[in-house]
Amino acid sequence: MSDFFVAIGLVLVLEGLVYAAFPDLMKRMIFEVLTLPSNSLRSGGLMAMLIGVVIIYLIRG
């Protein structure tokens, strides 16, 4: 269970780093995301999930 909280913490650190380092870029990217069709967002989310599962599988075996 502690691995889960470490993973959540790491996600928050990486997200916060991007917003802190590139705030103007993130504003533009958020606007771009709002203009994308739902199917594109869904496909991107599913691909990100799949890549995450593969990485976890490769590391944890």
Image (cartoon, rainbow, N blue to C red):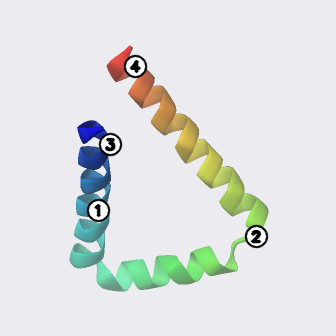
For disc 4, the neighbor class at 10 Å (few under 14, some 14 to 19, many from 20) is few
Amino acid at circle 4:
Leu
Say which of marks 3 and 4 sits in front.
3
Name the front one of labels 3 and 2: 3
Q: CA distance from mark 3 to mark 2?
A: 31 Å
Which residue is tagged 1?
12
Q: Which residue, given by chain and number where applicable, does mark 2 sit on?
A: 37
**Residue carrying label 3:** 4
Q: Could you say where residue 16 lies in the image, as x and y percent from the top left?
A: 26, 70
Earlier sequence position, callout 3 versus callout 2 = 3
Task: Indicate whether 50 appears above or below 25.
Answer: above
Q: Where on the picture, by quarter, is residue 17?
A: bottom left
Instruction: Measure the C-alpha gap from mark 4 to mark 1.
Output: 23 Å
CA separation in Å, label 1 and label 2: 26 Å
Mark 1 crowdedness (10 Å alpha carbons): few <14, some 14-19, many ≥20 = few
N-terminal label among 2 and 4: 2
Q: Secondary structure at mark 1?
A: helix
Query: Is 12 situated above or below 10?
Result: below
Q: Residue at x 27, y 59 (%)?
A: 14
